[in-house]
Amino acid sequence: MFALKRKPTHPGDVLKHEFMEPLGISQTQLAKELNTTFRTINEIMNHKRGISPEMAVRLAKYFGTSEELWLNLQMQYDLYRVKDKRKDILSRIKPYSELHKAVNC
């Protein structure tokens, strides 16, 4: 896998700009259609909530996409955030192969 040079797009931005805006769907309408709350949709769109597996299934069914689309967007975003937030800790972790190279030689 390759390292991303930029922060991945939050799934809420993809939902808003690639699906809702082109189709003219409001947050209220989407919440109603997905049988969820306005607050849930609003928090996703404002990066205060991620895409859960259940929401991925609902969005996939509604928009005719795959569940994996939504989960992959969320996973890329989450992994990037963890790597950025914990880079100090991660920089001190040495790969197993490097630690045991000298022992096995």
Image: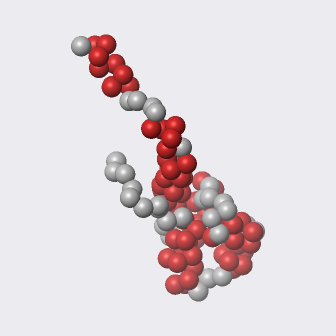
Q: Residue 45, relative to residue 57: is it above or below?
A: below
At 69% from the left and 66% from the top, the residue drawn is 43
> Number of labelled discs?
0
Q: Seen in the image, is 19 located left or right of residue 32?
A: left
Residue 41 at x, y percent in the picture: 68, 69
Residue 29 at x, y percent in the picture: 69, 79
Quadrant (top left, top right, bottom left, bottom right) of the C terminus: top left
Considering depth in this image, is 72 or 61 the residue closer to the camera? 72
Q: Is residue 66 visible?
A: no
Q: Is residue 99 visible?
A: yes
At 57% from the left and 79% from the top, the residue drawn is 20
Residue 54 at x, y percent in the picture: 63, 56
Considering depth in this image, is 35 or 94 the residue closer to the camera? 94
Residue extending farthest bottom: 24
Quadrant position of residue 91? top left
Residue 73 at x, y percent in the picture: 49, 59
Q: Residue 14, relative to residue 73: is it above or below?
A: below
Considering depth in this image, is 37 or 14 the residue closer to the camera? 14
Considering depth in this image, is 85 or 3 the residue closer to the camera? 85
At 33% from the left and 25% from the top, the residue drawn is 98
At 28% from the left and 13% from the top, the residue drawn is 104
